[in-house]
């Protein structure tokens, strides 16, 4: 019953979001759009029955390249509930997801075909241009989702965009948990799990919560992108282990 009720709330919230994107977004400036993004993301987490706690260890720069560990499709909503200014880089097949694909595209997401090296160069260029004009861009440098406790290697390609324009790197550490599970298995979107299966596991899980830690920004000036990727991974991994 818990899962069915939450699922109905999620569907109603998604439909509300579609109306906002279609009717209100075109008439809002950047600040107004960010307000809607933050409000909708927080509402989605509430509808799912997930409690988000944000821990901030440093000042958030006005412009930055955000890097975060990747556990679930939920990650974007968690980050947007705290940092609605973030424009995400996401894998291209998300665009084909029913309803959600159109919504994330309308919110300014940049899509990348990770199997094509040439497409990565295109996205690096677009990220650098976005940073130049004052946008904050967010990437998942692992390239795919993981179980949570141990991070996959951070790919350095997209981090070049921050190095190219001397934009700071802002690491985030995201951990889903529930009583008895320091890293909640219900939140992990891994393996052959479908989107619908993942949604059902989340709405059915009691007392699911997420901790989002905003770590101190890293100065990228004169840094090598691979060293930057290793440093960011080290700091996110340490925060998850804390």
Image: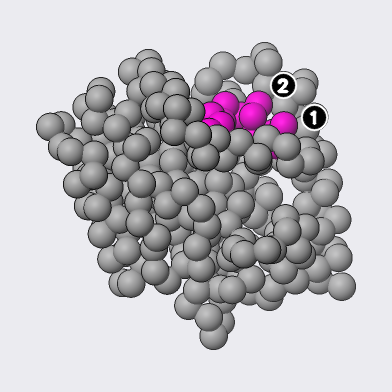
Task: Answer whether residue 60 is visible to the viewer in this image.
Answer: no
The residue labelled by disc 1 is: 19
The residue depicted at 85 percent of the width and 63 percent of the height is: 5
Furthest residue in direction bottom, as rendered: 180
Pinpoint residue 42: horizontal percent, then vertical percent: 61, 48
As drawn, is 67 to the left or to the right of 192? left
- Using the image as rendered, state which of residue 80 and residue 95 is in the foreground: 95
Do labels 1 and 2 touch, CB within 8 Å? yes
Mark 2 nearby-residue class (10 Å; few <14, some 14–19, many ≥20): some
The residue labelled by disc 2 is: 24
Mark 1 and mark 2 lie on one chain; the one further toward the N terminus is 1
99 shown above or below 184: above
Pinpoint residue 24: horizontal percent, then vertical percent: 72, 21
Secondary element at tag 1: helix
13 shown above or below 121: below
137 shown above or below 4: above
As drawn, is 233 to the left or to the right of 69? left
Pinpoint residue 119: horizontal percent, then vertical percent: 48, 28
Secondary element at tag 2: loop
As drawn, is 176 to the left or to the right of 67? right
Pinpoint residue 222: horizontal percent, then vertical percent: 12, 32
The residue depicted at 44 percent of the width and 23 percent of the height is: 122
As drawn, is 179 to the left or to the right of 149? right
Q: In the picture, which quadrant includes the N terminus? A: bottom right
How many numbered badges does the structure rendering display?
Answer: 2
Which stretch did the figure color magenta? 101-112
């Amino acid at each position: 019953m818990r899962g069915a009720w939450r699922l109905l709330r999620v569907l109603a919230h998604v439909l509300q979001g579609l109306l906002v994107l279609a009717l209100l977004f075109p008439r809002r400036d950047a600040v107004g759009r960010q307000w809607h993004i933050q409000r909708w993301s927080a509402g989605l987490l509430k509808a799912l029955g997930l409690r988000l706690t944000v821990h901030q260890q440093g000042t958030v720069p006005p412009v930055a390249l955000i890097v975060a560990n990747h556990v679930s499709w939920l990650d974007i909503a968690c980050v947007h509930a705290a940092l609605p200014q973030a424009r995400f880089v996401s894998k291209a097949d998300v665009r084909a997801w029913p309803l959600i694909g159109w919504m994330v595209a309308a919110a300014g997401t940049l899509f990348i075909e990770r199997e094509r090296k040439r497409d990565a160069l295109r996205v690096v260029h677009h990220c650098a241009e976005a940073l130049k004009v004052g946008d904050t861009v967010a990437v998942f440098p692992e390239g795919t989702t993981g179980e949570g406790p141990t991070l996959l290697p951070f790919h350095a390609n997209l981090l070049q965009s921050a190095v190219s324009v001397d934009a700071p790197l802002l690491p985030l550490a995201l951990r889903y948990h529930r009583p008895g599970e320091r890293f909640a298995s219900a939140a992990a979107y891994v393996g052959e799990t479908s989107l619908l299966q993942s949604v059902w596991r989340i709405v059915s899980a009691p007392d699911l919560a997420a901790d989002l830690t905003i770590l101190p920004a890293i100065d990228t000036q004169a840094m090598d992108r691979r060293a930057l990727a290793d440093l960011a991974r080290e700091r996110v991994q340490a925060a998850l282990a804390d």
